[in-house]
Amino acid sequence: MRKRSTLSMSAAMAVAGALLMSAPAGAAPNPVAGPAAQTAQKPLERQVLAAGNGWASAGTGTTGGSAAADAHVFDVSTKAELLAAFAAAGTAPKIIRVHGTIDANTAPDSSALTCENYAEGTGYSLENYLQAYDPATYGRSQAPAGAQETARKAAATKQARNIRVDIPSNTTIVGATPDSTITGAALRINGASNVIVRNLTVRDAHDCFPGWDPTDGAEGNWNSEYDMLQIINGATNVWIDHSEFTDAPNLDSSQPVHFGRPYQVHDGAVDVTNGSDLVTMSFNRFADHDKLLLIGSTDSPGRGDPGKLRVTIHHNVFENVGQRAPRVRFGQVDVYNNHFNVTEDSTVPYGYTLGAGFDSHLYAEANAFTLPAEIDAADIITRFKGTAITTIGNAVNGKVTDLRAVYNAAAAPAEQLAEDTSWTPTLRTQVHPAQAVPALLRNSTGPLFTAGAGR
């Protein structure tokens, strides 16, 4: 860990800040002191989420580690330094500035760890696992059990202990340069509160030991364990801003096929579950990932989700994502002014974008969808036991489209969705017309800051 260095803002951030400066009718005056607005007064790591910027501005608001004492400002470039910084400051306000690439699949001495290293001493090998549970001999009626499944779980436990990284309360973690990256980590905001993640690339939380479940669907599936970022167990007041989440370069399309099914090594990108609440995701880029944003992990109210899972998702770009952008249970989720772009050459199979799950309250307004001809606008919404959804002023390939009406026209009567009149979002920045969103966000999402003085 090193002493802090001063950050300067890129010109691109001025564009993003300008997008956040004016209020819609009925909103509080100047609802967001956007990044550009705060520049003259505070460096990046000292900035806070201002009032009116989504659900994370509710309650006590989200200030992260902005009030950190100089002794609790850390520059880190290895996993060991990152963990030491969290431990040194505990729950006191702290600022963590990430330099270069931090690889979670490393030992305490920063030497690389491979999947083979995690499997050592457990008796697991993929070859033996495939032989033991081949449906041609093992069958498809029961989940794997026996020596190789036990060995797989033991190896998976070793990886989990090494790559899970919990971000404590009252933390701002920020990239010091545009290429600041955390790779291979299963980051968690686990019961913590008041956390800011900005200007950071998070990539490839790959599971070395996916489990085979022959009973999952008609053909069985490989299931992986880790999300790039989990907001779980009652975590609250979390702001994710100007960051990027991607599987690249370890894309699903490069994985093998076993038992006739893709060998899935990735799970979610950012999941909000188990009674977590008050989250804002703004100006991020989500790319080349299948299961993206899961909000609420079960239909059971026993996880403490009813009345929680309030999330705002605005001014983000979603590039070649397959599904769950987001999929919602229980929560009041405000999705506006995002660009959902699927390119002709995408390697991620498209499923749907907006998932209306059990007791969900999803409000989608003025989003832009850029889709190839083979994807129908009726596929944008999928119902998972939900009963209602609000869609206003969204555009598909530049044409304003009533997404709910298009979905209902193609759906069976029992699968149709009513308009959700239970709530109206108020904690918003300016809402732009959907047709303007792709151009507004073209150079304004993902990590955009540059570093000033050296370390």
Image (cartoon, rainbow, N blue to C red):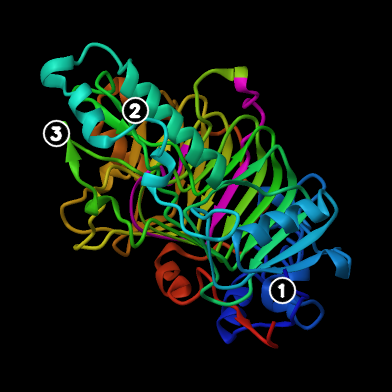
Q: Which residue was labeled with disc 1?
A: 44
* Looking at the image, residue 438 lies above or below residue 10: above
Mark 2 or mark 3, earlier in chain = 3
For label 3, count other residues whose C-alpha is less than 10 Å away and answer few (under 14), some (14-19) or many (20+): few
Is 168 in the magenta? no
Numbered label attached to residue 189: none
Q: Quadrant of the C terminus?
A: bottom right
Q: Which residue is mark 3?
A: 260
Q: What amino acid is at disc 1?
A: Leu
* 436 vs 60, nearest the viewer: 60
Provide the residue span drawn in magenta.
303-327
Query: Which of the 4 image quarters holds residue 393?
Result: bottom left
Q: Measure the C-alpha gap from mark 3 to mark 1.
A: 48 Å
On whether residue 310 falls in the magenta region, the answer is yes
Is residue 419 among the parts visible in the rendering? no
| Left or right relative to 156: residue 281 | right
Of the two numbered discs 1 and 2 in the rendering, the one whose residue sits closer to the viewer: 1
Mark 2 and mark 3 in contact? Answer it, CB < 8 Å: no
Give the mark nearer the N terminus: 1 vs 2.
Answer: 1
The residue tagged 2 is 416
Q: Are marks 3 and 1 in contact (CB under 8 Å)?
A: no
